[in-house]
Amino acid sequence: MAAAKKKKTMTYRGKPLYRVGDRIYYGNLEDKYILALDLQEKEKYNDQLERTSKVRIQLIDNTEGKIGEGQVYRRAERTDLYHALDIGEWWLNDALRMDSEQ
């Protein structure tokens, strides 16, 4: 019998990324907080490729049961995915650190 293949998860700075449609969840699903990135606008370049030109970032409470349905603690918009992940990753680490100190 063939060994079951483990599905690889894409990560950014050690935390997993999960995409559901135009929404990306960033962070460990077991943690109290998770980051939601909504890809709102896309623009074409090179006639064949698309890139995101507007991303909404939300730091969400992940203890409500359903992923992405908790209270929003912080919200912002950025012009590309890299800058959105950069600020969001800082928010997420700060929130998790503050929660662990209490």
Image (cartoon, rainbow, N blue to C red):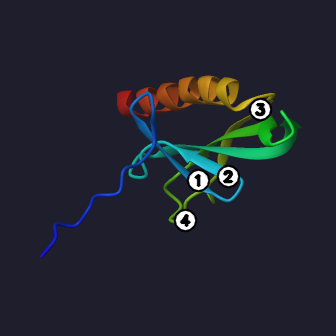
Q: Position of residue 62 (x, y in %)?
A: 52, 52
Mark 4 vs mark 3, CA separation in Å: 22 Å
Upstream in the sequence, badge 1 or badge 3? 1
Q: For mark 1, give the secondary structure.
A: strand
Mark 3 vs mark 2, CA separation in Å: 15 Å
Amino acid of disc 4: Lys
Any mark on residue 23, and which?
2
The image quadrant where one finds the C terminus is top left
Residue 59's image quarter? top right
Amino acid of disc 2: Arg
Upstream in the sequence, badge 1 or badge 4? 1
Q: Position of residue 26 (x, y in %)?
A: 53, 42
Q: Residue furthest front?
A: 47
Q: Position of residue 4 (x, y in %)?
A: 22, 67
Kindly identify which residue carries mark 3. 76
Mark 1 vs mark 4, CA separation in Å: 15 Å
Kindly identify which residue carries mark 1. 19
Q: Is residue 46 left or right of residue 97?
A: right
Mark 2 neighbour density, 10 Å: few (under 14) some (14–19) many (20 or more): some
Which of the two marks, 3 or 2, is nearer to us in this view? Answer: 2
Upstream in the sequence, badge 3 or badge 2? 2
The image quadrant where one finds the N terminus is bottom left
Identity of the residue drawn at 43% across and 34% down: 99
Amino acid of disc 1: Arg
Labels 1 & 4 near each other (Cβ < 8 A): no
Mark 1 vs mark 2, CA separation in Å: 6 Å
